[in-house]
Amino acid sequence: MTKISPYIFNTYKRQPLRFVRGQGAYLWTDRGEKYLDFFSGLAVCGVGHANPQVAAAVARQAKELIHTSNLYFTVPQEKLAERLSKRTFGGKVFFSNSGAEANECAIKLARRFGHVHNRKGKDRYEIVVFENSFHGRTMATLSATAQKKYQKGFGPLLPGFRTAKRMDLASVKKCLTPRTCAVLIEPIQGEGGVRPADRRFLALLKALCRRHDLLLMFDEVQTGIGRTGYLYAYQCLDVIPDVLTSAKGLADGIPIGATLAKPAVADLLKPGDHASTFGGGPVVCAAALAVLDILTPAYLKRIRQTGEEISRRLMEMRSRNPVITDVRGRGLMWGVQLDRPGDAVVPFCRENGLLVNCTAGNVIRLLPPFCVGKKEIDRAMDLIEKAIFSLTTIKKNL
C-alpha cells in the first residue's frame, strides 16, 4: 500500500499508486504495474505521456534559455502568442501558470471592462456564472465556482458573482443588474458532470451580452487544445467569445495558463495592471508550440472520429445497462451518468489496470489521450461495463 508522505499537504484524495514512467496512453508504477490511462492527468496529457516531440522541444529549449522574467521578450513566447491568435479569433494573449490563473486574469479583465464602460459613473463588477460550474481554487475563481462543496470553510468569498441556472436564458436575465459586466461559462462543464452547453443557448447568450454591453467569457481550461476534436470547443459552436481561458493540455503537462481576449478588450490592461513571474517562460512555450505542431487539422479530425467510436460504444453500453441514465460529451471528453453513486467504478477499473474518474458523485468521466486506438478503446469499454454491471449487486442508494 502506497503511503501518504508526511511532508506534503494532505489535500488530495490520492489513489494508492506511485507512477514513475509514462508513454502514450500508458503509465507504469514503481512496482512495474502497467495502466491504461483514460484520464490523461485530468485532461492534461492530450498528445500522450512523454510525447517525443514535446520532450525534445523541452530538452532543446532548456539547454538554451529557461527563464528571463517578463521584463524582457523571448522568441518562444512571441511565437506561441502568434500561433494561438492565428488559430483562434485573432486576439491577444496573457500567459500564466494554470487554469485558475487564466480565469483570474479574465475576472480582472472583466472588472476593468466594467470600470471603463461604467454606467452613469458607477463601476460594473458583477459576473454571471452557472450552477455546478468550476473555475478554480484561488479566492476569486473559487467565488466564481458555483458549487458549495468547494467553497465551504473559505468564506467570506469575493463578492460580485451571481449564479444562473444552466441553459436557462430567463435565469440569466434575472441575474443581470446595472452592475453586471460579464458572463462566464464552460462550453462543457467538467467537474460539474460533463454537461455540454446547448449551441442555441450559447447563441442567445451572446446576443444577450451584446444587447447589454457585457463580455462573454468562455472557460476552456478543460475543453481546449483538441479535447473536443477542435482546437477549442467554441469553434464547433458558432459562437465566438470576447475572452477565452486555456490551460491543462496546452503544454502536455508543463504548467501553463493562457487568457485570450479580443484586442480592444486585452488593451484595457496596461503595464503594471497584471503580471506573472513565470508566465509564458521559454521552456513551457516551447512545449506548447510542439503541442500545436501535433494538433493539425488532420489530427483533430482523427480525434473527432475516435470520439464518435467511443460515443457509439457508450450508447450501446447504455442500451444494455439500465443503471446508465445518460451519456454526454464530445470528442474525447465523455461522462457516463449512473442512477446511483459511481465511486466504486474507479477502484474496480484501477484494480484491472484502467484509470478513470468519477465526478459529481455519479458521473464516470473519461478523458483519454488522443493517441488511443481500437485496442485501448475495446479494453476500456469492456472494463467500464464490467465495473458498472458490478454496481447492480449493490443496493441502489435511494
Image: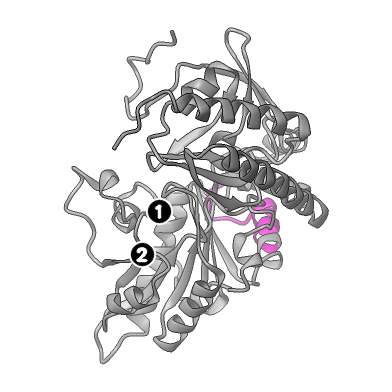
The picture places residue 128, in percent across and down from the top left corner, at: 34, 69
**Location of mark 1 (residue):** 135
Q: Earlier in the sequence, mark 2 or mark 1?
A: 2
The picture places residue 25, in percent across and down from the top left corner, at: 69, 30
Q: Quadrant of the N terminus?
A: top left
Q: Is 208 situated left or right of 91 in this image?
A: left
Instruction: Look at the image and tell me whether residue 261 can be seen.
Output: yes
Q: Which residue sits at x=57%, y=10%?
A: 30
Determine which quarter of the picture holds residue 212: bottom left
Q: Nearer the viewer, residue 315 or 336?
A: 315
- The segment highlighted magenta reads 67-82
The picture places residue 43, in percent across and down from the top left corner, at: 57, 42
Above or below, comparing residue 10 to residue 217 in the picture: above
Q: Is 393 situated left or right of 383 in this image?
A: left
Residue type at the position of mark 1: His
- Label 2 with label 1: CB-CB less than 8 Å: yes
**Location of mark 2 (residue):** 129
The picture places residue 40, in percent across and down from the top left corner, at: 59, 35
